[in-house]
Amino acid sequence: MSRKLVVGFDGSDASLRALDFAISRAQAQGDSLL
């Protein structure tokens, strides 16, 4: 079952790391990002 991940992004270093993590996770598990 694929899931949709929603990631908030404000341009900070922490949000960039969160986005990178979400992209990696989505690719590994067949999920999608919104």
Image (spheres, grey):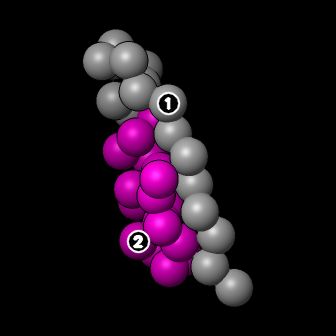
9 horizontally vs 4: left or right:
left
Q: Residue furthest front?
A: 34
The percent coordinates of residue 7 (x first, y second) are 51, 39
The percent coordinates of residue 30 (x first, y second) are 50, 79
Boundaries of the magenta span: 18-34
Q: Amino acid at mark 1?
A: Gly
| Residue pictured at 34% horizontal, 29% vertical | 16
Observer-nearest of 9 and 23 = 9
Closer to viewer: mark 1 or mark 2: 1
Find residue 27 and name its label. 2
Find residue 25 and name its label. none
| Residue pictured at 62% horizontal, 79% vertical | 2
Mark 2 packing: few (<14 Cα in 10 Å), some, or many (20+)?
Answer: few
Q: Residue furthest right?
A: 1
| Residue pictured at 47% horizontal, 53% vertical | 34
Observer-nearest of 7 and 29 = 7
**Vertical order, 23 against 28 (above or below):** above
The percent coordinates of residue 13 (x first, y second) are 33, 18
**Vertical order, 25 against 13 (above or below):** below
20 horizontally vs 2: left or right:
left
The percent coordinates of residue 18 (x first, y second) are 46, 35
**Vertical order, 4 against 28 (above or below):** above
**Vertical order, 7 against 11 (above or below):** below
Q: Amino acid at mark 2?
A: Gln
Q: Secondary structure at mark 1?
A: loop
Find residue 8 and name its label. 1
- Chief secondary structure of the magenta portion: helix
